[in-house]
Image (spheres, coloured by chain):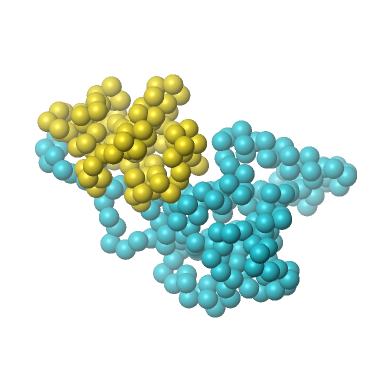
Chain colours: A yellow, B cyan
Amino acid sequence: MSTATISGREVRVDEEGFMVDPTEWSETLAADLANRVDIAELTPAHWTVIRFLRADFDQMGETATLRRVSTSTGIGTKELFDLFPKKPAKKMAFVAGLPKPKGCV
Amino acid sequence: MTTDTITREIPAFAREPETTRKLCIICSKGTLDMTYPGLVLANSALGEGVEVDMFFTFWGLDIVTKRRMGKLKTTPVGNTAMHMPQLLGVIPGMASLASTMMRKQIAGLGIPDVPEFLDTVVAAGARLWACKMSYDMMKLEEGDLYGGVLGVISAADFIEMSEGAQIIFV
């Protein structure tokens, strides 16, 4: 485990760079995290996903899979791939300061 | 603890690979249980930025045949992995029961049914192909196939398209 400096704040991250303590995240960190995974700007659609992920994590104790995000927010798979290209599930978890999802679908 | 002071460091998972990884999945089975390995692997690969082509051949064509894709079945007969006495498996209705039970278990895990799963992998960028030989053998027509299938191709076409790709045979 190590720390990373995000938006001037030190936060704890695991070997893959994911934040280990969801409470260290704040919405101001999200923009910096998004830049690191090549997302230039967080649109309202990005925020819908991020806020859903955070709320769902609080409720379920684990990060939602891509399918859960899609069925719960109504944002389709294709659009999720457009918002978070190539590795959507990992990127959205990363930006939301959550562990990468463990589920299969 | 080490401190990363580079504010723009890209995490390992998000670094662009030199070449995009390619995966070709051959789906040759049409039973409910054998449909999911291909679809789940395709979905996971797509979610990791891997390019995916799926080739449906022989019984696998049922997965992308409109009138069959929602009714795929499984049977304990001949499948000792289902831990059931074989004689019980041939009782009329057993295949339907086994299939219904399997569907429930799959749905209970939040995994979509076959038609929806196909929609998902196509939306995620999978390219679907039907095998010409099987298509001809089963006397299918264009309208019989699920809309997401890009074309009916030959084995030679598949061999060309899978150059450089990792291949999974189901």
Q: Quadrant of residue B9?
A: top left
| Residue A27: image location, x then y, percent | 24, 28
Q: Is residue B166 above or below residue A54?
A: below
**Which of B124 and B84 lies nearest the eye of the viewer?**
B124
Q: In the rendering, at what x and y percent does residue B131 appear?
A: 62, 70
Q: How many numbered discs sit on the rendered protein?
A: 0
Residue B83 in sight = no
Residue at left 46%, top 48%? B44
In percent of width and height, residue B87 lies at 87, 45
Left/right placement of residue A4 relative to residue B71 reads left
Residue at image position (61%, 49%) is B115
Quarter holding the N terminus of chain A?
top left
**Which residue in the rendered view is the most extreme toward the bottom?**
B156
Viewer-nearest residue: B40 or B149: B149
Q: Position of residue A36 (x, y in %)?
A: 22, 43
**B90 or A43: nearer the viewer:** A43
Q: Is residue B81 visible?
A: yes
B167 over B106 or under it: above or below: below
**Is B71 rendered above or below residue B156?**
above
Q: Is residue A27 left or right of residue B55?
A: left
Q: Which residue is painted at 19% across and 37% down in the image?
A: A32
Q: Is residue B133 left or right of residue A35?
A: right
Going 64% across and 68% down the picture, which residue do you hit?
B142
